[in-house]
Amino acid sequence: MAAERPLYLRPPPLLSSIPRLRLRHLTLSFLASLSVILSSHLLLPLLLLLLLPPLDLAGSSRRPRRSVVFVLSPELGVDGASSPSAPPIPSAPAYLLPAAARPHPFALVHAYSSLARRSKLSSSRSLSIFQDLSSSFSQLASKISSSSSSNLDDDSLRLLEKEAKEKIKTARQIISESKESFDTQLKIQKLRDTIFAVNEQLNKAKKLGSLSSQIAAGSTPKSIHCLNMRLMGDWINNPKKYKKLIPNPNSPALINPDLYHYAIFSDNVIAVSVVVNSAVKSAKEPRKHVFHVVTDKMYVAAMSMRVWFLRRPPAHGARVDVRSVSEFGFLNSSYSPVIRMVEGGRKDLDLLEYLRFYLPEMFPKLRRIVLLEDDVVVQRDLAGLFRADLGGKVNGAVEMCFGGFRRYSKYLNFSTEAVKEKFSPRACAWGFGVNVFDLDVWRREQCTDQFHQFQNLNEDGLLWNPGTVLPAGLATFYTTTKPLEKSWHVMGLGYNPSVSQDEIRNAAVIHFNGNMKPWLDVALNQYKHLWTKYVDSEMEFLPLCNFGF
């Protein structure tokens, strides 16, 4: 069978009048520039095949490849034919194109314009740009065709070449700017950069929000400050009256181990009054309940707390013992590493929070005591905690873990050898707020000494965050904690708006842990009434200080 006859590329008539060297220079410059503009991997093989001489495959055993002829026409753009019967044009130079070659760059401009229309780009400007680009090259081809009948001199050729270069330069800039619309990798990278930037902004906003919440939770509202000042003023005006009413801390009624003793560490008068009031109202035998309130060594905090409970003593025979840190002589920098750090200028340690680790020394006559934090509300008689079987453990507490959450790995730094050797990262964490301590077992296990060892190891803050007291408790009572039934202590009312109402109703104690304390304006409204109903509204100073309860 006869080999297929090749088809030929017929250049426009104008090009036949241009000197061969100039024609070749203009054509190659134009095509190379346009290939860079379009950045098309399909155009590069075409240019190489145009520059390389035709391959002689006559001696090859392979089947001859079909040839295609492309005829440049200003009216038709680029046409292709596969018929082997087309006659050759002797007067025109022939450039053999294989079938693997793709259309001329002019056709690629039309293709980009067609792609923009089919894709329905959101930006009409992009579509208009490609249409104008296609029209520009069509006009250039038409101009060349219309001038083919006349001989062009060198000046005309230079003008034509200058015009072509300007259009190519414009096309390069336009397509470079529009390349993003067709480059999926660039879009993906840009999307990744956007997501990363948004995540950075989100993390920054979370940190700022957390800092703002901590500032709000740690600040003293004007109403509470007003209350402290009025209570202090009342003490100054009537010092003799109040001094006579202050009970002896060593009186049998306050140190009787057969009574139910509670420890509260706080200088928030209104919060402590709610804890005491709710516990007394929920108790079956209020006269057996004794509340030991330890305040800051500041004179104002201690005196205002005393005046409140001297003016508004708990009902039904319950007792309140208010004492200042300075009244416990053993609490000094030579004995306590916490006091040493605080006196050394550590601002991240709250001394009142860490006093819970000295309960056996503060109350040497007691055998068992329940620790209550100042942001809890008691809803059920707590006498059962004093009869709970701790199984020889020091601490009875409600566990917080579920699944992989709130384990020791959340609170302790397991990248340090001191933590990795002593604790398991999967150990379940428990919470402070309602804790029953067997002080006899505490003394036998020397838990205070263990706390001192861990606190000294954590002086640089590498083992845990020293700004919170829970990690120190988890470390100190690691093997000496007995889990309590969960209804004794329901947590989360200071940050979680989704706490079950059934859990709240059945809870012995509800805990407003978190930054949204019930005495603050940022409190969760659905829980605030659970706290405000125990506020002593008959206290005469509350209306004067604009408490909005």
Image (cartoon, helix red, strand yellow):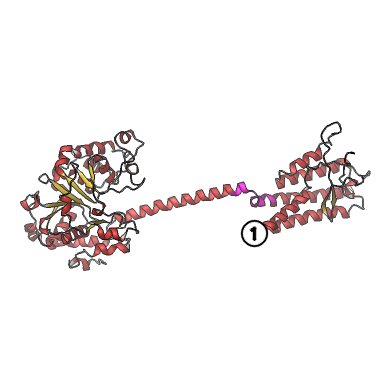
For residue 497: magenta?
Answer: no
Extreme-front residue of the structure: 1
**Quick one: 286 or 48, which is closer to the camera?**
286
Task: Provide the residue span drawn in magenta.
Answer: 175-187
Question: Tag 1: Cα neighbours inside 10 Å, few (<14), some, or many (≥20)?
Answer: few
Q: Is residue 232 visible?
A: no
Determine the main secondary structure of the stretch shown in magenta.
helix
- Residue at the image point whose x is 25% and y is 47% from the top: 350
At which x and y percent is residue 319? Answer: 11, 57
* Image-based side of 429 in relation to 307, left or right: right
Left or right: where does residue 101 sit relative to residue 461?
Answer: right
Say if residue 98 shows up in the picture: yes
Q: Secondary structure at mark 1?
A: loop
Q: Quadrant of the N terminus?
A: top right
Q: Write down the quadrant of residue 335 in the picture.
A: top left
Front residue of 202/21: it is 202
The answer to whether residue 146 is above or below residue 31 is below
Q: Residue 344's x, y, as percent?
A: 25, 41
Q: How many marks?
A: 1
Q: Position of residue 6 (x, y in %)?
A: 87, 42
Q: Quadrant of the C terminus?
A: bottom left
- Residue drawn 75% across the image and 52% down it: 109
Viewed as shown, does residue 168 lie left or right of 400? right
Q: Residue furthest top?
A: 59
Task: Identify the residue position indicated by label 1 in the image.
Answer: 123
Image height of 78 relative to 455, above or below: below
Residue flagged by tag 1: what amino acid is it?
Ser
Q: Provide residue 354's location: percent of width, then percent of height.
A: 23, 45
Foreground residue, 95 or 327? 95
